[in-house]
Amino acid sequence: MFIADELYAQILEYSVIPTADIIFLNKDKKILLWLRNNVPLQGVYYIPGGRIQKGETMIEAARRKAKEEINIDINTAKLQFIGVYEDIYKDPFMHYIPCTFAYPLSEQEETNIKVDEQHSELSFFAYNDPTLHPLLQERLQTIQNGYKVFKI
């Protein structure tokens, strides 16, 4: 469902936004991050994702965001639910509830990845890279502590 920019700005000002975010890992257990062009986290390498639309499940939103932001049709059977988190940003003030998934990329999927207009570049990072954003490190710790995606 498309929401006009002006209305969406008002929604952001007064509401908590549920999102579906995906941590993509390659066969070397490195995570794929995009350099964000938009707030929040403008200029930071972070995972793709976005708001869950009314009437859409978390998995449907994850599938849609993967297609929109990185140009791949994910196999939802490979999606692994990691958890629900809370991201509160102060400047500008935004409050999100990301439903976060992990996804092991196949080599074929990796070759189809493209950068969208919301990001200026992409790169693979070690999951334990200390320079990664703290909100991302929290999610990666959850994955490392027992999710089968690390056994790819």
Image: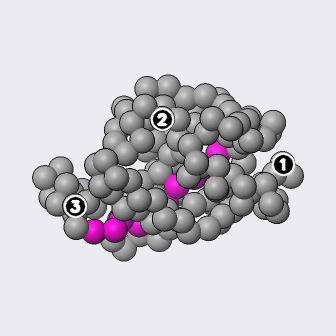
Image quarter of residue 132: top right
**Alpha carbon separation for disc pair 1 and 3:** 40 Å
Direction from residue 37 to residue 101 in the image, left or right: right
Q: Amino acid at mark 3?
A: Glu
**Alpha carbon separation for disc pair 3 and 2:** 22 Å
- Front of the two marks 1 and 2: 2
In the current view of this chain or complex, which residue is farthest to the bottom?
55
**Chain part drawn in magenta:** 15-24
Residue 152 disc label: 1
Q: Does 111 sit above or below residue 31?
A: above
SS of the residue under disc 1: loop
Q: Amino acid at mark 1?
A: Ile
Q: Amino acid at mark 2?
A: Val
Residue 59 position in % (x across, y down) = 54, 65
Residue 13 disc label: 3
Residue occupying the point 31% across, 47% down: 91
Residue occupying the point 58% across, 48% down: 134
* Residue 16 colored in magenta in the image: yes
The numbered mark, 1 or 3, whose residue comes first in the sequence reads 3
Image quarter of residue 33: top right
Residue 107 position in % (x across, y down) = 74, 35
Q: How crowded is the residue under tag 1: few (<14 C-alpha within 10 Å), some, or many (20+)?
A: few
The numbered mark, 1 or 2, whose residue comes first in the sequence reads 2
In this view, the residue in front, 109 or 120, is 120
Q: Does 116 sit above or below residue 134?
A: above
In the rendered image, the quadrant that contains the N terminus is bottom left
The numbered mark, 3 or 2, whose residue comes first in the sequence reads 3
The dominant secondary structure in magenta is strand
Residue under circle 2? 44
